[in-house]
Amino acid sequence: MHAADDRDATNRAPLAAAGLVKRFGGVTAVAGVDLEVASGEVVGVIGPNGSGKSTLFNLIAGMLPLDEGRVWLDGREVTGLPAWRIARAGLARTFQIPSLFDNISVRDNLLAAAVEGDWKRAPQRADEVLALLEIGHVADNLASELSGGQQKLLEFGRVCMRDPRVVLLDEATAGVHPNIRRIMLEAIRRLREQGVTFLVIEHDMEMVREICDRIVVMDEGRIVVEGSFAAIADNVEVQRAYLGRQR
């Protein structure tokens, strides 16, 4: 496992975390997670419902306070910072249910995401994102008029507008049309080639196999197995609990 410790405070890994713990009353949702993700790496996070995946994302993104542990972005410690400051430090995320401005256009949703960045270049960047995600034909539609899959693309587009260093994707292709899934995967690959780092929660094992360089399996708030898709798929415990196979 790529454990993170105090040395991460001085390295340049895009994302590193050490000893992350979160308790809700008597329940420990995340129980001492160590994680490090390299530049341009796509790491998948899988596990059953309630295993702590989304809570882990919320801790890294500053949306929940840590009970214990530390988080670094590009060697800079961001432990305890509010979510907006962590976002400005280079981290962006999507949610299982897209969070959009429903009553403005697709293009204006993209522009709104760039308001804290390079505003002069924002219109050109919006055109690039519309082309990347193949949603230029609905650029003037209200976000509320989009299909569920198109809304997921738009939310991902808003992430792209921020030119993030690290992206957390929470089931970005769940329940979408195969063409939407294709567009999303191609966009992730292109951004990875540009050095963007991804941490991905996903239940779609085919997507995990196609896009992830490494996979961590969570259960009861801990990382219980880690490795390539082939290694994970050959693990008897993972086959039984997560891939639905028996030996």
Image: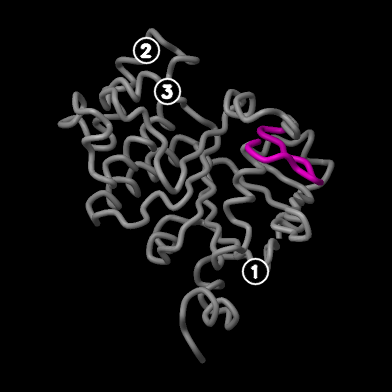
Q: CA distance from mark 2 to mark 3?
A: 13 Å
As rendered, which of 213 and 139 lies closer to the eye?
Answer: 139
**In the picture provided, is 46 more to the left or to the right than 7?**
left
Position of residue 105 measured from the top left corner of the image (x, y, whole percent):
26, 24
Spatial CA span between label 3 and label 1: 36 Å
The reply to whether callout 3 and callout 1 are in contact (CB within 8 Å) is no
Q: Amino acid at mark 1?
A: Val
Report the residue marked by disc 3.
113
Quarter containing the N terminus: bottom right
Q: Residue, x 53% and y 41% (percent of image)? A: 197
Residue 164: x and y in percent read 51, 30
The residue carrying pointer 1 sits among few (fewer than 14), some (14 to 19) or many (20 or more) residues within 10 Å by Cα, namely some
**Element under disc 3:** helix
Q: Which mark is residue 132?
A: none
State yes or no: residue 76 in magenta: no
Q: Is residue 102 left or right of residue 29?
A: left
Residue found farthest to the bottom = 247
Q: Nearer the viewer, mark 2 or mark 3?
A: 3
Q: Earlier in the sequence, mark 3 or mark 1?
A: 3
Q: Nearer the viewer, residue 239 or 38?
A: 239
The x, y position of residue 171, in whole percent, is 44, 53
Residue highlighted by disc 2? 121
* Residue 72 covered by magenta stretch: yes
Q: Position of residue 205 (x, y in %)?
A: 42, 66
**Image: 108 above or below 135:** above
User: Foreground: 141 or 107?
Assistant: 141
Which stretch did the figure color magenta? 62-75
In the figure, 18 relative to 128: above or below? below
Task: Select label 3 or label 1 by which is in front.
Answer: 3
- Residue corresponding to mark 1: 225
Amino acid on which disc 3 is placed: Ala
